[in-house]
Image (cartoon, helix red, strand yellow):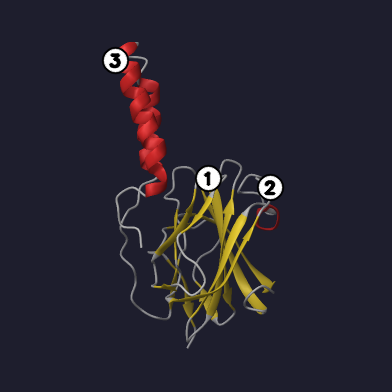
Amino acid sequence: MVKAPIVKEGYVYISVLAFITIVVALTVDICWSIIPGVLFCFVSFFFRNPNRTIPEDDRLIVSPADGVVMGVSDVYEDQFLEEMGVRITIFLSVFNVHINRSPIAGEIKYQQYTCGRFRPAYKESVGCENERHTVGIENERMRILVTQIAGILARCIVSWVTLGTALQRGERYGMIKFGSCTELVVPTSVEVLVKKGDKVRGGETVIGRLRE
């Protein structure tokens, strides 16, 4: 959905920092421009939008985000699946790509935005307390639930989709600014292929496979 090297949500931050860097270099001292210059480079890096090689097998579920798996646990999902499932929680540091991707091909059948607190994204309770945006995606094989969760620095969850949007596996559908967590709940018919501590890449790492 978004194919530019840097997502548009970063343009304002990058432009302001570039302007400050140039002004400081020209009117104060080039040495003092290093500080806003470093921030300019970091923010440009943060809002990067890399291409990924998406697996083609329809049975596969790919990671919705870059980061580290914080936990894999059984849970009763009562928002969309309305059955027992497996929850996979992924923590994103400020150095990870923060674009979220659809784990499967399907249509968005459920969507909910919830205001909340801004606790650190690595806390176990953030999925219940923090600002979050949840989408339920369905195809002919399965239903899954994906939640973008804001962290202590993340104050804005961005979504580029709405109810009825059809997504391809690995397609970009939103992002969370500056540190966050993403949760995925899959049905028990899915064989989970990751464990706590594993590093994953959005749209590329296979985190589950639908059992035959």
Q: CA distance from mark 2 to mark 3?
A: 41 Å
Task: Look at 42% across and 76% down and name the residue there.
Answer: 105
Q: Quadrant of residue 189?
A: bottom right
In this rendering, the answer to whether 67 lies above or below 35 is below
Mark 2–mark 1 distance (CA, rounded to whole Å): 14 Å
At label 2, the amino acid type is Arg
Q: Which mark is residue 117?
A: 2
Q: Amino acid at mark 3?
A: Leu
From the top left corner, tell me how far across and down residue 201 is, in percent.
41, 58
Asked whether the beta carbons under mark 2 and mark 3 sit within 8 Å of each other, the answer is: no
Disc 1 marks a residue whose amino acid type is: Gly
- Sequence-wise, which precedes: disc 2 or disc 3? 3
* 3 or 1: tag closer to the N-terminus: 3
Residue corresponding to mark 3: 26
Dot 3: few (<14), some (14–19), or many (≥20) neighbours within 10 Å? Answer: few
The residue furthest top is: 28
Front-most of 161 and 34?
161
